[in-house]
Image (cartoon, rainbow, N blue to C red):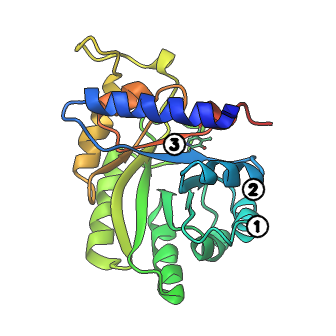
Amino acid sequence: MSDLATRYRDLLAAIAAAAQAAKPPRTVRLLAVSKSQPAAALRGLYALGQRQFGENYAQEMLLKAAELSDLTDLELVFIGRIQSNKIAAIVRVAAAVQSLASERHARLLAAAVASVGKTPYPVHLLINAAGEASKDGLSGEAAQGLARTIAAELPELRLRGVMAIPPPLSQLQLGDDGRGVPRLFRQLRLLADSIGEGDLSLGMSADLQPAILAGSNCVRVGTALFGERR
Ligand SMILES: *Cc1c(COP(=O)(O)O)cnc(C)c1O
């Protein structure tokens, strides 16, 4: 087996084991985060069965979409910082956006998906769970406000839930259930339950196990699959 095949198999097994151990057990999907990877790397993982890929940069995503246009059921999901002038391009090639973080962008996104006939378009609200100044994202309260606006005024968007990029595990306070799950992760599960369809996108290479135990439905993994980014 190739290194990629081995890593993919091991990752799927780790996700399945954690999903079984979660209370309640959940279905957890894998978004393969392919930023900085060449199109050939996505093609390799596609050949092993992976269909959803997360991309962070609009320009890079467009180039890969063009190179991979023969793989008609491959889905690109945008998980990077949104810029207003890139929204039209993003919705042309991405099947969903997980990093929506403002009402202004929600309105621009709604107009853009309406004009290309991709409604209702799946979105997650990006939560800045620890209130870090260096990161984009909404507070829990702001996210609930934006969720109400979307429900009332933007039927072009299908609000799936929330996405978060929390601080490293070493900086988080663990809950007291002895399972190594940060309190913050539990809070994000509760927040997700109150937003849209309740989907929680949480967990990356270093923290996917506690994220799934806390109730994540979607992990976004780059390094553990493709190796260190250049
Ligand atoms: C890069 C990135 C990931 C993947 O992180 P790894 O540590 O490489 O698994 C997940 N989510 C977002 C939003 C990212 O930007």
| Cα separation between marks 1 and 2 | 7 Å
Splitting the image into 4 quarters, where does residue 129 fall? Answer: top left
**Would you call the spot at circle 2 few (<14 residues within 10 Å), some (14-19), or many (20 or more)?**
some
User: Whole-percent x and y of residue 187?
Assistant: 28, 34
| Dot 3 or dot 1, earlier in sequence | 1
Tell me: 197 left or right of 133.
Answer: left
Q: Is residue 174 above or below residue 83?
A: above
**Residue at x 26%, y 40% (from the top left corner):** 26
Question: Where on the picture, by quarter, is residue 72?
Answer: bottom right
Mark 1 C-beta to ligand 1 under 8 Å: no
Question: Which residue is label 3 attached to?
Answer: 220
Q: Position of residue 24 (x, y in %)?
A: 18, 35
Indicate which disc, 1 or 2, sits on the residue closer to the N terminus: 2
Badge nearest the viewer, 3 or 2: 2
Seen from the viewer's position, the closer of residues 37 and 20 is 20
**Tag 3 and tag 1, C-beta contact below 8 Å:** no
Q: Which mark is residue 39?
A: 2
Q: Residue at the left extreme?
A: 24
Tally of numbered tags: 3
- Percent position of residue 13, x then y: 44, 31
Which circle marks residue 67 in the picture?
A: 1
